[in-house]
């Protein structure tokens, strides 16, 4: 029977922060620091390291792309919601006679402050409109309840 070659010893100097991360990682994995360091060096020196790094970048870019698509969808919903509201409001709200218009202008600041307060409460405790609308374009509207 052939005896396997013995591992060789290597002494390295690590920055304290790197050593701390090595110790914590080894403890979380319940493995020796030597085994973790050996795996890290092997990974760094392996010929497919570039491919694995590219795969990690690709995965991250795909996640960012999905988030951007969701963000684009949410902004589109917001813009369309505002457009529908403004069109509805303009088509159903009659112009006020001048004395009533002056009184309405006087209340504008107070009503706007109440609107901003209500919006702040809604954003703070949700649910948000985008959470109430199904992710599928043809899906049903999900109502909180």
Image (cartoon, grey):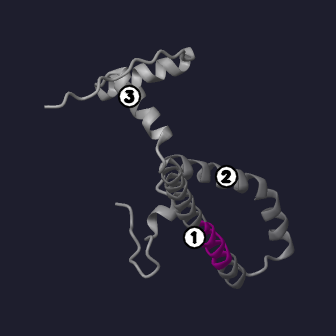
Residue closest to the eye, 102 or 21: 21
Residue closest to the eye, 87 or 69: 69
Give the label, 3 or 1, closer to the camera: 3
Q: Pointer 2: what residue?
A: 116
Which quadrant holds residue 95? bottom right
Which quadrant holds residue 36? top left
Give the label, 2 or 3, closer to the camera: 3
Look at the image and say whether residue 66 sits in the magenta stretch: no
Residue closest to the eye, 70 or 116: 70
Q: Residue at x 43, y 82 (%)?
A: 138
Instruction: State whether residue 143 is above or below residue 108.
Output: below
Identify the disc placed on residue 142. Answer: none
Q: Secondary structure at mark 2?
A: helix
Dot 2 alpha-carbon crowd within 10 angstroms: few under 14, some 14 to 19, many 20 or more? few
Identify the disc placed on residue 36. Answer: 3
Instruction: State whether residue 31 is above or below residue 130.
Output: above
Dot 3 alpha-carbon crowd within 10 angstroms: few under 14, some 14 to 19, many 20 or more? some
Give the label, 2 or 1, closer to the camera: 1
Distance from the alpha carbon under mark 3 to that under mark 1: 43 Å
Determine contact: label 3, label 1, CB under 8 Å. Answer: no
Q: Residue at x 38, y 77 (%)?
A: 140
- Residue 28 image point, x, y percent: 33, 26
**Mark sitting earlier along the chain (2/1):** 1
Distance from the alpha carbon under mark 2 to that under mark 3: 54 Å
Residues drawn in magenta:
72-85
Residue closest to the eye, 46 or 83: 46
Is 142 displayed left or right of 57 in the figure? left
Q: Pointer 1: what residue?
A: 73
């Amino acid at each position: 029977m052939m005896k396997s070659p013995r591992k060789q010893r290597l002494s390295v100097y690590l920055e304290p922060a790197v050593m701390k991360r090595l110790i914590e990682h080894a403890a979380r994995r319940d493995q020796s620091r030597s085994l973790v360091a050996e795996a890290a060096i092997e990974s760094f020196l392996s010929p497919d390291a570039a491919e694995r790094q590219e795969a990690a970048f690709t995965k991250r870019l795909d996640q960012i792309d999905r988030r951007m698509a969701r963000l684009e969808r949410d902004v589109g919903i917001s813009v369309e919601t505002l457009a529908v509201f403004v069109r509805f409001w303009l088509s159903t709200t009659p112009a006020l006679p001048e004395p009533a218009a002056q009184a309405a202008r006087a209340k504008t600041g107070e009503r706007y402050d109440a609107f901003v307060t209500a919006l702040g409460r809604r954003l703070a405790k949700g649910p948000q409109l985008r959470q109430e609308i199904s992710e599928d374009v043809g899906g049903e509207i999900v109502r909180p309840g």
